[in-house]
Image: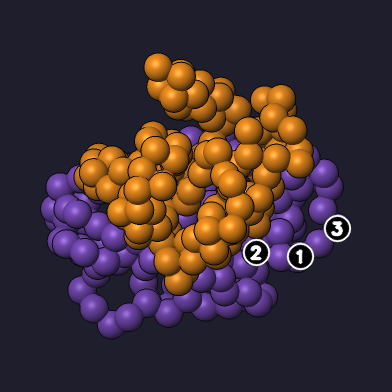
Chain colours: A orange, B purple
Amino acid sequence: MRFLVVDDSRIMRNILKNTLIRLKFKSDDFLEASNGEEAYGILMKEKIDILLLDWNMPTLNGLELVKRLRAMPSYKDLPILMVTSEAAKYNVIEAVKAGVTDYLVKPVTEKNLEDKLNRIFQRKKA
Amino acid sequence: MNAKSILPFIDVTVHAFKEMFGVELEAKSPYLMRKDTPMDWEISGVIGIAGEARGVVVLSFQEDLAVALTGRLLGKKKAGMDEDVIDTVGEVVNIIAGNAKQGLEDSRLQISLPSIVMGRNHQVVWPSSTIPIIGIPFTSLYGDFHLSVGLESLVL
C-alpha cells in the first residue's frame, strides 16, 4: 500500500506518516509533497495507492488537484482522503462534488484516521 | 461581532489544543481590543478571512510555550525556535480558523494560508476599519497565549 501524503506543513506530513506507521503501515510506503503541483508530478511518475491531501496549499491547492485528477480516466478511481482544517459543511460538499473519496477534518487523531482508511479500503474491496 | 460569533473560535481552540497537544485550556473573558492594545508576544500566526465577511485571526505565543507545544506534538523535547515551531504555530492557527467556519456557516468564508510574525513585543497593527477586534486570553499549565479575532458582517 503506497501512500502519497500532501500537505504544505512539514510537521503535518510527519504526524500523518507517524500515525500511519502506528497503524502498521510500512515506513517505506510513503511519498510526500508540499503542494498540489508537486503531488501531480509524483503521481505522473509513481504508482500511488492512496492520496492523503490537504486543501489549502500554495501553487495548486488540494481541491484543484482533485478536479485535475478526476478529469483523467486513469485517476478516476484513485482513493483520495482530503485531510484539512476546512470544517464547514459547504467545504465538505464542494470536496465531495470535486471527487474526494472521503473527508477528514484536522486535528487528526489515530482513531479518526484509522476509521476513514478502513471505510475507504472496504469500499475499494466491494 | 457578538458573543455568539466568538464562541466557535473559543470552542475550536480548546478542542484543537486537547487533540493536538493533550493540553487543557481555560479561556479568560473576551475583550474588545483597541488599535494600540500592546502585544508582548514573541511569535504570532496570522490567517486572513475573505468571502462574505472579511477578517483576521491572530494566534500569539511566547517563544517558550510555542517551543514546548511543538515538543509535545513531536513527542520529543525541542531546544528552541526552529522551522518545526514556526510550522506548528502556522498549523494551529490554520486549524482554529478552518474549524471555526463550521460554527459560522451563515457566511461563506475562505481562509488564507498562514503567515508568521516573529520578534519580541512585535505589534500586529489592525487596519483602520470598523471591524471590531476581540481578544481572548487563554491559560494552560504550560503558559498563557492570546487569540485575536476580527470579523465583519456578523450580527452585532
Q: Residue furthest bottom?
A: B128
Provide the residue designation for mark 2. Answer: B86
Q: Amino acid at mark 2?
A: Ile
Please tell me which residue is depicted at 43% across the width and 79% down the height of the picture.
B125
Q: Amino acid at mark 3?
A: Ala
> What chain letter is assigned to the residue under label 1?
B
- At x 30%, y 54%, the residue is A71
Question: Could you say which disc has been placed on residue B81 in the image?
Answer: 1
SS under mark 2: helix
Task: Return the x and y of residue A51 as percentages of the image width and height.
Answer: 51, 44
Give percent across and percent down for residue B91: 55, 55
Amino acid marked by disc 1: Met
Image coordinates of residue B23 in percent, x first then y, are: 63, 36
Q: Are marks 3 and 2 on the same chain?
A: yes
Which x, y percent locates residue B92?
A: 53, 52
Where B5 sits versus B80, above or below?
above
Residue B56 as seen in the image, left or right of residue A115: left
Which quarter of the rendered picture does the C terminus of chain B lie within? Answer: bottom left
Please check whether the numbered discs 1 and 2 fall on a single chain: yes
User: For the residue labelled by badge 3, is the local secondary structure a helix, a strand or a loop?
Assistant: loop
Q: Which residue is mark 3?
A: B79
Q: Look at 28% across and 40% down and name the residue there.
A: A96
Q: Earlier in the sequence, mark 3 or mark 2?
A: 3
Q: Nearer the viewer, residue A121 or B144?
A: A121
Residue plotted at (67% across, 25% down):
A23
The chain identifier of the residue carrying mark 2 reads: B
Res. B102 visible in picture: no
Asked if the residue at tag 2 contacts the one at tag 1, i.e. Cβ–Cβ closer than 8 Å, the answer is yes
Question: Neighbour class for label 1 at 10 Å: few (<14), some, many (≥20)?
Answer: some
